[in-house]
Image (spheres, helix red, strand yellow):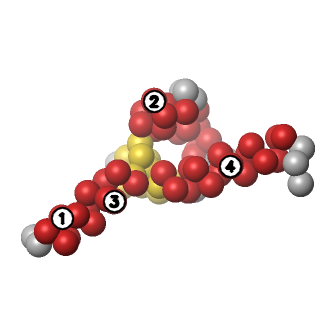
Amino acid sequence: MTNETSGSLDELAKEIQGAVDLQKWTGTPASTWRYWAHIGYGPASFKLGRRRVWRRSVVEAWLAEQEKSSSGVA
């Protein structure tokens, strides 16, 4: 594997977040993230093997959208 490939894999690994990672980051329980994914609520997620994961950039965009809609700012 080249350094370029290794570098992009490292970046991808930082971008991919599991439910426990999101709990540590947001304070919202991991079980809530998994439940939201199950019912189709919240940011888009996908399965990576047996794990449910989220892209950090997608979660950040979703959180910003939630903040905007709840603050009453148009």
What is the secondary structure assignment of the residue under circle 4?
helix
Report the side of 9 relative to 67 (left or right).
left
Instruction: State the CA–CA distance, disc 2 to disc 1.
Output: 26 Å
Check disc 2 and report its element: helix, strand or loop: helix
Whether pointer 4 and pointer 1 mark residues with C-beta atoms closer than 8 Å, the reply is: no
Disc 3 crowd, CA 10 A, few/some/many (<14, 14-19, 20+): few
Q: Helix, strand, or loop for circle 3?
A: helix
Residue to which mark 2 is pinned: 24
> What is the distance, in whole Å, between disc 3 and disc 1 at their CAs?
10 Å
Q: Which residue is mark 1?
A: 6
Question: Can you identify the residue that label 4 sits on?
Answer: 64
Farthest residue to the left: give it. 1
Q: Nearer the viewer, residue 5 or 35?
A: 5
Q: How many marks?
A: 4
Of the two numbered discs 4 and 2 on the same chain, state the one appearing first in sequence. Answer: 2
Foreground pick, 10 / 52: 10
Residue 57: numbered disc: none
Classify mark 4: residues with Cα within 10 Å, few (<14), some (14-19) or many (20+).
few
Q: Using the rendered image of the protein, determine whether residue 27 is visible from the camera's viewpoint.
A: yes
**Amino acid residing under circle 3:** Leu
Would residue 64 be found to the left or right of residue 60 on screen?
right
Residue at image position (89%, 44%) is 72
**Looking at the picture, which amino acid does disc 1 mark?**
Ser
Disc on res. 12: 3
